[in-house]
Image (cartoon, helix red, strand yellow):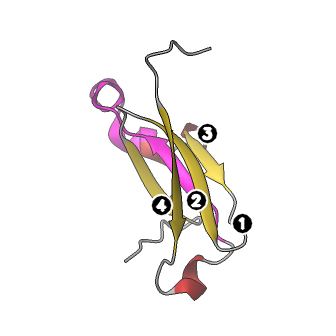
Amino acid sequence: MCSKDVEVRKLYFKGLAPSSRFKLQPLRILKWDDDILLTENREDYVGKKENYSSWPWLKSGWTIPFVTGHKYKIHWGNNGLDWT
């Protein structure tokens, strides 16, 4: 359970280009807060798949809840696709 001070916002990612590269790819999210990066070896932290959350592609994009006040590293697929 979270305290009442925690806010969760929903973000919808859609219309990424080129669309053929992103369709059906999972969206992967890694917590990227400063306190984590200061205590972890960055290369090891990024390399561990269990540190990521994965969200499937649904119809035309991805709808993801985020806790405000935190940082996240986001990429698509297993190869770290970027977007425009």
Neighbor class of circle 3 (other Cα within 10 Å; few <14, some 14-19, many 20+) is few
Q: Which residue is mark 3?
A: 50
Q: Please report contact status of discs 1 and 2: CB closer than 8 Å, yes or no.
A: no
Neighbor class of circle 4 (other Cα within 10 Å; few <14, some 14-19, many 20+) is some
At label 4, the amino acid type is His
Front-most of residues 55 and 69: 69
Which of the two marks, 1 or 4, is nearer to us in this view? 1
Q: Helix, strand or loop at disc 1?
A: loop
Q: Please report contact status of discs 3 and 1: CB closer than 8 Å, yes or no.
A: no
Q: Which residue is mark 2?
A: 27
Chain-order first, disc 4 or disc 3: 3
Which of the two marks, 4 or 3, is nearer to us in this view? 4
At label 2, the amino acid type is Leu
Q: Which residue is mark 1?
A: 58
Q: Please report contact status of discs 1 and 4: CB closer than 8 Å, yes or no.
A: no
At label 3, the amino acid type is Glu
At label 1, the amino acid type is Leu
Range drawn in magenta = 25-45
